[in-house]
Image (cartoon, grey):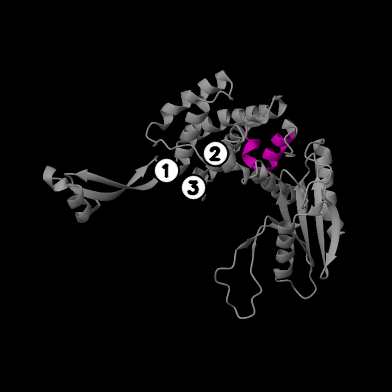
Amino acid sequence: MERNSNIQIRNIYYMLSYAYQTLNLTEYKHIGAEKFENVKDLYSEVLSIGIPVLIRGGLIKDYVCVEEKSTVIKGKIDINASIKKNALVDKKLVVIYDEFSEDILLNQIIKATLVFLSHSAKIKPKTRRLFYGFLPYFEEVSNREMNLQLWKNVQYNSQNIRYQFVIDVCRYLYEELLLDESSESQSMKQIQDEQRLSALYEKFIFSFYKRETNYFVSRPQIQWKVDDGFSEALPIMQTDIVLQTSNKTLIVDTKFYSENMGTRFEGGESKQKSNNLYQIFTYVNNWNKKPSEIVGGMLLYARTIGLSQPNHTYNINGNQIFVLSFDLNQDFNGIKADLLAYVNRFFN
């Protein structure tokens, strides 16, 4: 595989710093000065600090639905369940009620991560013992099997947003550890389509442009230009990043792949990945632009070690489409300069 697996650890730290303002808290300050042998050690260090911060702030609670046999009437009585479970024989009823509890998905993910990491041979023994020592704080939280599906139903709001950084790093570290397994394992197959580092890569690019430029930066959904107003079952067009000035709009789609160019057969001529090109072209052409607005698109790939890397500008149907790659393994000042130069091609 050509995946960009040799990204400097310090650059991943910088990516985290941009993507999550939390990393700027005092507790994390020393991390920037440390040297890590690999990204797993970086993520582990972040969690060793971030999880105690959450614990000290108090594990978040929410109302969860509880169903149990009881002699005490509370909540709603489920007569059908009471009959099916023979609860009446014991002079009990099945009752359903809401309980304010720590046993919610976010805490379950952290506990599952701690259990997994405290038994992982890929984590340093000292760190494993540290993670194991956090588990008593999650005694009231249910055990869940560690898998990528845990993150599918995570939703954030103003009450639990402080969890986002730790929850995301739990996933990054879990994915890194999965990729150390045999490529024939089911876990490896499960993660191949998830694209390791892609979520962090997207968050970093978005936050970088929001912090380092004066453009209006957002990630809106684009509506299909349907002639009769009927759009049922059409896929959602969710942008990664949109940069805007008063009269120009650049739609950016980030890509982190093992290969940035495709070939029809071994040794054949390298071509753009058609699905990605179709996607950005569709976004640009369905953008609801103003009469004087200029709209462009950009596919921004993280460079791999492959010989063929995209660096092309197309003018299609009156719109500029940039297909570019940049090196995440260079000095971070170079990364900043490249990212600014890419968007300035369009806006200047």
Q: Residue 30: image x %, image y %? A: 67, 26
In-image side of 141 versus 285 (left or right): left
Q: Which residues are magenta?
A: 11-25
User: Does residue 9 show up magenta in the picture?
Assistant: no
Which residue is labeled 3 in the image?
159
Secondary-structure class at tag 1? loop
Q: Quadrant of residue 204?
A: top right
Q: Which mark is residue 186?
A: 2
- Real-space Cα separation, disc 2 to disc 3, in angstroms: 36 Å
- Above or below 133: residue 288: below
Q: Amino acid at mark 2?
A: Gln
- Check whether the beta carbons of the residues at disc 1 and disc 3 lie within 8 A of each other: no
| First in sequence: mark 1 vs mark 3 | 1
Question: Which label is found at residue 104?
Answer: 1
Looking at the picture, tell me which residue is in the foreground, 231 or 131: 231
Quadrant occupied by the C terminus: bottom right
Of badges 2 and 1, the one in the foreground is 2
Secondary element at image label 3:
loop
Q: Is residue 27 visible?
A: no
Point out the image quarter for the N terminus: top right
Callout 2: SS: helix
The kind of residue tagged 1 is Ile
Q: Earlier in the sequence, mark 2 or mark 1?
A: 1
Classify mark 3: residues with Cα within 10 Å, few (<14), some (14-19) or many (20+): few
Dot 2 or dot 3: first in sequence order is 3
Which mark lies nearer to you, 1 or 3?
Answer: 1
**Residue at 82% of width from left, 38% of height from top?**
333
Q: Position of residue 343 (x, y in %)?
A: 81, 54
Relative to 286, residue 201 above or below: above
Q: Nearer the viewer, mark 2 or mark 3?
A: 2
| Distance Cα–Cα, label 2 vs label 1 | 27 Å
